[in-house]
Image (cartoon, rainbow, N blue to C red):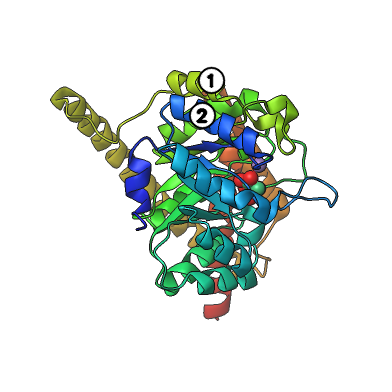
């Protein structure tokens, strides 16, 4: 009988196991190590969506009976990736406990439709990874398609977004996208997959800690009994013992504290923030009044609304004012571009509406 994903994750929130099931002994040895660390949700890729052909593409059906055998030997639940209705049927036949939809599948509304259709009426937990490209709506759309089919036992996996630029991590986290999606579906648990974000084992700790700091509901971490021999994602997999060390080093945060002096101090600081935000809004209102006055003045003098030199000057001076105080340029640029963009829109309306 399928259980609510949030309840399964409540135990310790960790899903671990190999990127791919490569052999019976690799799967059993890895699981044995994980069970010894208190892990009870084992992931293993059966069908692997690889970027290039001729890479290891998973063992397919051959490996599915091993997932069932794992449950007979160990007190674990199993999880695997499905990318078609045929995968769903086979995974269900072999009593896999949790299914997940990979990043390359979330990008395709056709596939999501097909998979959600094949799951309609089933209560098996399904986890939806974010799409590979940084498109929040595509992720939301996939979630909505499952919900529309009455599939509510859903969880989300944040695994980062690919980039063509060279970057520290294999995939860019874009934490804000994950947080926005979490706010849109507060009832759905969201775990972070530091393995696919980092791409290298040395980044797992910092990414996992950040996820805990942001109040994620758990972690999915690729674990292999012998990562050096892994047939896929070898650089990001760690041993069960390394996982134990990693988890031990992480600080879990709680969403609130019972301590009354903590609460009182937080309230005091939040009051100050409210006050400052109020001042920011008042400043924006005064600024918009000036923007409107300038709009009218430009119109009267038959001068165009947008002047690039003025925008450049605004961005340059605001960065100079903020940088010495440690406010980064990219933040200032984004903020003032947004303000400027809206100012231009207001002046446009003035040009349209006044004679
Ligand atoms: C995986 O979890 O092994 C996987 C293929 O992940 P993603 O879909 O995030 O690339
Ligand atoms: Mn992988």
**If you read the primary sequence from the N terminus, does the residue marked by circle 2 or circle 1 appear first?**
2
Q: Is mark 1 within 8 Å of ligand 2?
A: no
Answer yes or no: is residue 295 visible: no
Answer yes or no: is residue 237 visible: yes
Residue occupying image coordinates x 51% and y 49%: 68
Image position, residue 309 (x, y; %): 72, 49
Q: Quadrant of the C terminus?
A: bottom right
Residue occupying image coordinates x 64% and y 30%: 237
Residue occupying image coordinates x 81% and y 46%: 55
Residue 223 lies in quadrant: top right
Number of residues whose C-alpha sits closer than 10 Å to that of mark 1, classed few (under 14), some (14–19) or many (20 or more): some
Residue toward you, 231 or 333: 231
In this view, which residue lies farthest toward the right? 54
Front tag of 2 and 1: 2
Spatial separation of the CA atoms under disc 2 and disc 1? 11 Å
Label 1 sits on a secondary structure element that is helix
Q: Which mark is residue 282?
A: none
Residue toward you, 334 or 343: 334
Number of residues whose C-alpha sits closer than 10 Å to that of mark 2, classed few (under 14), some (14–19) or many (20 or more): some
Label 2 sits on a secondary structure element that is helix
Measured along the vertical axis of the image, is residue 355 above or below residue 17?
below
Q: Which mark is residue 241?
A: 1
Residue toward you, 162 or 200: 200
Image position, residue 176 (x, y; %): 51, 46
The number of numbered discs placed on residues in the rendered structure image is: 2
Image position, residue 218 (x, y; %): 43, 39
Q: Quadrant of the N terminus?
A: bottom left
Measured along the vertical axis of the image, is residue 271 above or below residue 152?
above
Image position, residue 99 (x, y; %): 51, 55
Label 2: which residue? 32
């Amino acid at each position: 009988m399928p259980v609510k994903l949030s309840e399964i994750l409540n135990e310790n929130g960790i899903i671990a196991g190999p990127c791919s099931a490569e052999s019976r002994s690799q799967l059993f040895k890895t699981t044995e190590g994980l069970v010894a660390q208190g892990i009870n949700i084992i992931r293993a890729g059966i069908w692997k969506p690889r970027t290039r052909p001729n890479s290891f593409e998973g063992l397919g059906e051959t490996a599915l009976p091993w997932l069932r055998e794992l449950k007979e030997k160990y007190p674990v639940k199993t999880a695997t990736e499905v990318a078609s209705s045929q995968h769903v049927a086979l995974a269900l036949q072999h009593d896999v406990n949790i299914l997940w939809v990979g990043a390359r599948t979330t990008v395709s509304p056709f596939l999501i439709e097909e998979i959600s259709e094949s799951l309609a009426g089933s209560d098996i937990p399904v986890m939806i990874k974010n799409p590979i490209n940084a498109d929040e709506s595509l992720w939301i759309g996939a979630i909505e398609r499952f919900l529309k089919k009455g599939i509510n036992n859903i969880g989300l996996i944040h695994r980062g977004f690919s980039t063509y630029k060279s970057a520290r991590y294999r995939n860019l986290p874009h934490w804000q996208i994950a947080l926005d999606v979490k706010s849109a579906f507060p009832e759905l648990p969201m775990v972070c997959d530091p393995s696919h974000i980092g791409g290298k084992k040395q980044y797992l700790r910092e990414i996992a800690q950040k996820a805990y700091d942001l109040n994620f509901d758990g972690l999915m971490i690729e674990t292999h009994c012998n990562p050096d021999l892994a047939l896929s994602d070898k650089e990001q997999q760690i041993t069960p013992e390394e996982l134990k060390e990693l988890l031990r080093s992480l600080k879990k945060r709680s969403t609130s504290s019972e301590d009354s002096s903590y609460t009182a101090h937080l309230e005091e600081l939040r009051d100050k923030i409210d006050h400052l935000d109020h001042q920011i809004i008042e400043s924006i209102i005064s600024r918009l009044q000036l923007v409107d006055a300038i709009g009218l003045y430009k119109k009267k003098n038959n001068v165009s609304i947008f002047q690039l030199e003025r925008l450049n000057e605004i961005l340059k001076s605001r960065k100079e004012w903020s940088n010495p105080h440690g406010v980064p340029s990219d933040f200032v640029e984004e903020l003032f571009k947004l303000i400027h963009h809206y100012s231009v829109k207001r002046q446009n309306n003035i040009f349209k509406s006044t004679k």
